[in-house]
Image (cartoon, rainbow, N blue to C red):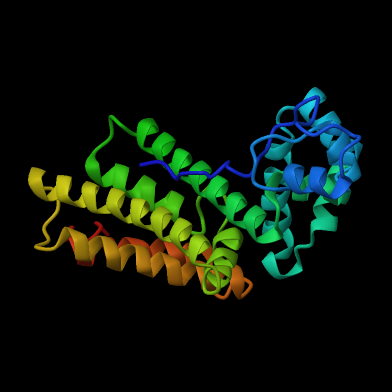
Amino acid sequence: MHVQVDRARERPITTDCSISKQEDCAARVTICQGRERHHCATCADEAGYGADVVRSQKQSPGRADDIVATTIEFITENGVGQLRTVDIAKRLGVSTGLIFYHFETLANLVEHAFAVAAERDLTQLRNTLDSVANESVLDRLRAVLRHYGPTGNALGWRLWIESWSAGLHDENLRKVVKNMDSQWRQTVAMLIAEGVGSGEFHTPDPHGAAWRLTLLLDGLAVQSVALGGAVTTEEIHRWTEDALRNELGLPAPSA
């Protein structure tokens, strides 16, 4: 299942407004700034969105995507708490009005950015599975856990630690994070169940084993990323291997 990205607030521009310039300005702005699925260039400018709105629609159809990508980058570098609309506007060389035109509020932009980041991370997970499709189930599980953990190539644990914090106060964001977390854990549980079926793994509870393994990596990620390397990469690898053997009944490594 893919993360659903809500694009309802990315409004296209028409070249003309349904109310002529001779009619009352307040009425014109009310219609154009409401939740109608249209917006004219003239009223965009008069409502304070500026010429950037027109340029973005005519010259750069992906402008909203650029805003999202820059927001993800900023949050990863500086955290959600430091995010201001003006910072994103400065990085892109656009007005803050353009950002509000696409997303209406900073909260909407943050939710959208995390949803896009989650989908990218899940795409990387699928690519990882594809790259080891012909390997043993143990090697596939190791590849997934390596990618999931703080030593892997996932989008970035700094971003997801930020999402946990921000999600405490934002139900929509919390749903995005829970969905991504659930899909990772389901993948781990699926691989463990496959290994049990083939006789390679030995556990009566693949679901519980998946929870315990991913929770271990969650905790190690916080220690490694949020606390400035409190644990080393070598320790993360060794403890993950120990957990795999204990959870799945694997033989001890040969001396």
Residue 64: image x %, image y %?
Answer: 70, 39
Label count reads 0
Q: Is residue 239 visible?
A: no
Residue 44: image x %, image y %?
Answer: 84, 40
- Residue nearer the viewer, 157 or 20: 20
**Residue 239 vertical placement versus 57 (above, below):** below
Please report the residue visible at 63 percent of the width from the left and 55 percent of the height from the top.
Answer: 108
Q: Quadrant of the N terminus?
A: top left
- Residue nearer the viewer, 62 or 182: 62
Q: Quadrant of the C terminus?
A: bottom left
In the image, 250: left or right of 139?
A: left
In the image, 251: left or right of 116?
A: left
As drawn, which residue projects farthest toward the front?
23
In the image, 229: left or right of 212?
A: right
Please report the residue visible at 24 percent of the width from the left and 38 percent of the height from the top.
Answer: 136
Residue 247: image x %, image y %?
Answer: 21, 65
Q: Is residue 38 visible?
A: yes
In the image, 77: left or right of 25?
A: left
Please report the residue visible at 50 percent of the width from the left and 49 percent of the height from the top.
Answer: 118
Residue 24: image x %, image y %?
Answer: 87, 44
- Residue nearer the viewer, 238 or 22: 22
**Residue 171 vertical placement versus 104 (above, below):** below
Q: Quadrant of residue 203?
A: bottom left
- Residue nearer the viewer, 230 or 65: 65
Please report the residue visible at 50 percent of the width from the left and 61 percent of the height from the top.
Answer: 172
